[in-house]
Image: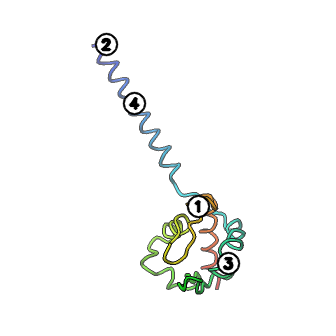
Amino acid sequence: MRHLLNIRTVGATLLLALVVMGAAIAQAAAPLKGNPAAGKTLYTTKCVACHKADGSGGIKLTGNPTPNWKLPKTWADPIRKNPDVFMRDCIQNGKIKSGMVAWGKTGQLKPQQIEDLIAYIHTIAKKK
């Protein structure tokens, strides 16, 4: 009987540990909050060449257009159903066909910096 109680105690302790670990992992995986001011600095140094200082986009050397962050239709495009996820993927992994650099994958930008850029791009969209 005492052996059964020990097994139950160990099982309950293990279950509790798994729940706590799961919560910690979920919290660590949550997106970081971006700082638009820090993002503006990064945007000015890394993004202006292709996306223009005002975020209106243009044509890159690859011949492909870059998004105009000022247009509501850019944000309404179904490909950007979840714009933060879409931008995070583009900045992290790049887009070979469009010529978008994989800033995160190459280590040129850290995850916090990517979140800062996303936060700044949202401010461009809100400017009229």
Seen from the viewer's position, the closer of residues 102 and 74 is 102
Q: Secondary structure at mark 3?
A: helix
Of helix, strand and loop, which one carries label 2?
A: helix
Q: Residue at x 43, y 76 (%)?
A: 79
Residue furthest to the left: 1
Q: Nearer the viewer, mark 4 or mark 1?
A: 1
From the viewer's perspective, is the residue at label 4 or at label 3 nearer?
3
Q: Between marks 2 and 1, how big is the CA–CA gap?
A: 57 Å
The residue under label 1 is: 106
Mark 4 and mark 3 lie on one chain; the one further toward the N terminus is: 4
Residue wearing tag 3? 48
Badge nearest the viewer, 2 or 1: 1
Instruction: Identify the residue at horizontal 29%, vertical 18% (top origin).
Output: 4
In the rendered view of the protein, which quadrant contains the N terminus?
A: top left
Query: On the image, numbered disc 2 is attached to which residue?
Result: 2
**Crowd around label 4: few <14 · some 14–19 · many ≥20 (10 Å):** few
